[in-house]
């Protein structure tokens, strides 16, 4: 039975401040913990006016401090943006403060546009090409070795759960080679989902981190008392995707009635493809969609995300999901 977890981008809706968005992230994490969700992850994105989780490790500390038992982590840290030692120190500190609760998912995309990527890295030449070596270096900093000249303190000897993230076959192959659990970003890039999972499972090599393949797949969930309400909630994410495709960024827009009907057929097709891994509707409809997704992927875990304009409606969406999928949640 696939367990359920939460991915949050700390969305900044129109008219809301980043501070309010971060307070909402902590509030949602507390709700998720009480409902029995397994993990609560935050993602690294930069120069995005609608996302408040850019300083991901800082936000993870904020959320972990507001909760007690739920695992908290990064889904993920875009490692080419950072020196491995810095991430080892940051997550080593988080693990020291919140023992047994910190996850570190790693990705190789910049999480932004190329101009911002340059501002982050200064030198782009070695970024993604060095990703496998950087992952190994990062994990090695957590292995106790007193004689090492460069040490991550905190970090060395701390327990952090490492994950490989991906939306293509590359991440699946690397996760398999390193023996790490694998999380696929099917909530926005589902095209390679089935092939990536198959390759990961076929090529997986046991490691000190994991003895068998472990897959997480992500999906969008919009649950409400009626299907019409749920589809209205989803229109905020749909607008954001369409705007991003045009190179436009901004706060999460307010919902719009019958938004899909306003799109031309090509834009509608692109949107439907990008968001095909979504559960939208009442509790029963969402449960059916989650079950179908679990059967399709055979995922050990399903991570749900919900970009909703109104925070109260987002809370209610997770409550409906939890009630409909109670058997997939841990005892509260």
Image (cartoon, rainbow, N blue to C red):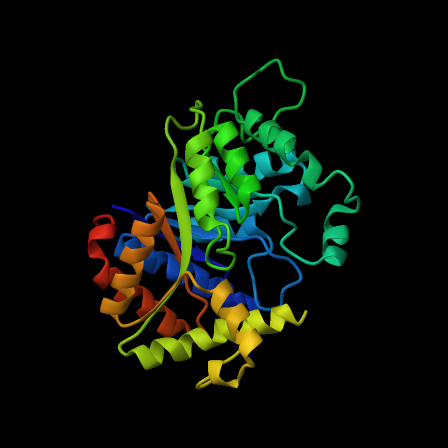
Location of residue 39 in the rendering, given as x and y in whole percent from the top left corner: 37, 48
The correct choice, above or below, for 195 with respect to 218 in the image is: above
Q: Is residue 122 left or right of residue 129?
A: right
Q: Which residue is drawn at 45% across and 40% down?
A: 182
Location of residue 91 in the rendering, given as x and y in whole percent from the top left corner: 53, 38
Of all residues, the one furthest to the top in this rendering is 147
Image quadrant where residue 24 sits: bottom left
Location of residue 2 in the rendering, given as x and y in whole percent from the top left corner: 29, 47
Q: Residue at x 68, y 41 (%)?
A: 128
Image quadrant where residue 279 sits: bottom left
Location of residue 208 in the rendering, given as x and y in whole percent from the top left corner: 43, 22
Count of all numbered marks drawn on residues in the image: 0
Q: Is residue 207 left or right of residue 55?
A: left
Q: Which residue is drawn at 52% across and 85% down?
A: 262
Q: Which residue is drawn at 76% across and 57% down?
A: 115
Viewer-closest of 296 and 15: 296
Q: Answer yes or no: is residue 290 visible.
A: yes
The correct choice, above or below, for 173 with respect to 192 in the image is: above
Q: Answer yes or no: is residue 159 visible.
A: no
Viewer-closest of 207 and 147: 207
């Amino acid at each position: 039975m696939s367990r359920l977890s939460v991915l949050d981008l700390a969305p900044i809706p129109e008219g809301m401040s980043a501070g309010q968005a971060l307070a909402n992230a902590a509030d949602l994490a507390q709700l998720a913990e009480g409902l029995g969700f397994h993990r609560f992850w935050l993602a690294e994105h930069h120069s995005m006016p609608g996302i408040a989780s850019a300083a991901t490790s800082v936000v993870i500390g904020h959320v972990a401090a507001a909760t007690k038992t739920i695992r908290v982590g990064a889904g993920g840290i875009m490692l080419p943006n950072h020196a491995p030692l810095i991430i080892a120190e940051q997550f080593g500190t988080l693990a020291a403060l919140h023992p047994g609760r910190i996850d570190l998912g790693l990705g190789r995309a910049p999480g932004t546009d190329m101009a911002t990527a340059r501002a982050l890295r200064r030198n782009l030449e070695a970024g993604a090409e060095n990703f496998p070596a950087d992952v190994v270096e990062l994990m090695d900093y957590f292995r106790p070795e007193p004689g090492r000249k460069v040490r991550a303190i905190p970090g060395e000897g701390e327990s952090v759960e490492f994950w490989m993230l991906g939306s293509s076959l590359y991440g699946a192959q690397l996760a398999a080679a390193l023996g790490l659990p694998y999380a696929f970003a099917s909530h926005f890039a589902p095209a390679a989902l089935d092939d990536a999972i198959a390759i990961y499972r076929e090529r997986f090599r046991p490691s000190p981190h994991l003895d068998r393949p472990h897959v997480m797949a992500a999906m969008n969930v919009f649950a409400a008392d009626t299907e019409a309400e749920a589809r209205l909630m989803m229109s905020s994410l749909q607008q954001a995707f369409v705007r991003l495709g045009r190179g436009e960024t901004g706060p999460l827009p307010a919902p719009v009635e019958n938004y899909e009907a306003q799109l031309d057929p090509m834009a509608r097709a692109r949107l439907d493809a990008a968001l095909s891994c979504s559960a939208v509707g009442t509790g029963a409809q969402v449960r059916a969609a989650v079950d179908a997704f679990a059967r399709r992927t055979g995922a050990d875990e399903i991570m749900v995300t919900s970009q909703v304009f109104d925070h109260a409606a987002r809370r209610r969406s997770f409550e409906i999901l939890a009630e409909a999928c109670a058997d997939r949640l841990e005892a509260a």
